Amino acid sequence: EADIYQTPRYLVIGTGKKITLECSQTMGHDKMYWYQQDPGMELHLIHYSYGVNSTEKGDLSSESTVSRIRTEHFPLTLESARPSHTSQYLCASSRFAGGGEAFFGQGTRLTVV
Amino acid sequence: DQQVKQNSPSLSVQEGRISILNCDYTNSMFDYFLWYKKYPAEGPTFLISISSIKDKNEDGRFTVFLNKSAKHLSLHIVPSQPGDSAVYFCAAKTTSGTYKYIFGTGTRLKVLA
């Protein structure tokens, strides 16, 4: 069982609010990822990190930002939420540079009203 | 440009029969492939993977086949069970350079009792 946790599981918030989605893993993985998924669509990579103080933007442009101050923690922040940010956000981590799977958290379903 | 494609959005199979889910990729640099299973409002869970040096990998009821020349892989589930009903995502990555997992759009499998 993967030890990667996301909070909150569900969030309904008003337009213009600042939000932070939390992601923590206890596996000591260097690599962490944030994906965004809408129903019926693929998982789009929006941010990834190779280790502490390393963050990169993913393939899908996102207005969110991330930080990696500690190995186990990879929070995602939206400074001003908009209805277009409504989506499911999935955090993942992996150990190996080569093969090996990524482990996912349970996701955060964000609704901006 | 979608690098990993799952052209069948849905599939229905009778319990006990074989389920075959297909995936195509375009990037010849991909050398590691994975299948994930996802329930609504949950994160994906890893099922099985295959390295490009192999053409088949088996784990219990799940077998993944890789045809590198056709840039095609498939997941076989035998026998299918009602609990297998979920969305299945194909993913691919390179084992050098970046460590990003690129996902397809998913195939919704329904196993009928």
Image (tube, helix red, strand yellow):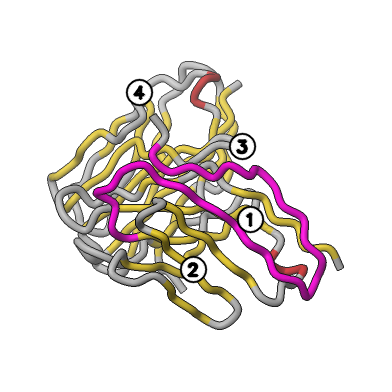
Where residue B11 appears, as percent x and y from the top left, is: 72, 52
| Among numbered discs 4 and 3, the one appearing first in the sequence | 3
- Nearer mark to the viewer, of 1 and 4: 1
Return the residue at label 1: B39
Q: CA distance from mark 4 to mark 2?
A: 37 Å
- Image point (20%, 59%), residue name: A30
Name which residue lies at 58% across and 30% down.
A111
Residues drawn in magenta: B3-32
Mark 3: amino acid: Pro
Q: Give amino acid for label 2.
A: Val
Please name the residue that numbered disc 2 is placed on: B64
Residue type (three-letter) at the residue carrying disc 4? Glu
Q: What kind of element bears circle 2? A: strand
Mark 4–mark 2 contact, CB under 8 Å? no
Q: Which of pointers 2 and 3 indicates the residue nearer the eye?
A: 2
Q: Disc 4: which chain?
A: A
**Disc 1 residue type (three-letter):** Tyr
* Secondary structure of the residue carrying numbered label 4: loop
For the C terminus of chain B, the image quarter is bottom right
- As drawn, the residue found furthest toward the front would be B69
Q: Chain of mark 3?
A: A
Residue at x 69% of width, y 56% of height: B109
Q: CA distance from mark 1 to mark 4?
A: 27 Å
Q: CA distance from mark 1 to mark 2?
A: 20 Å
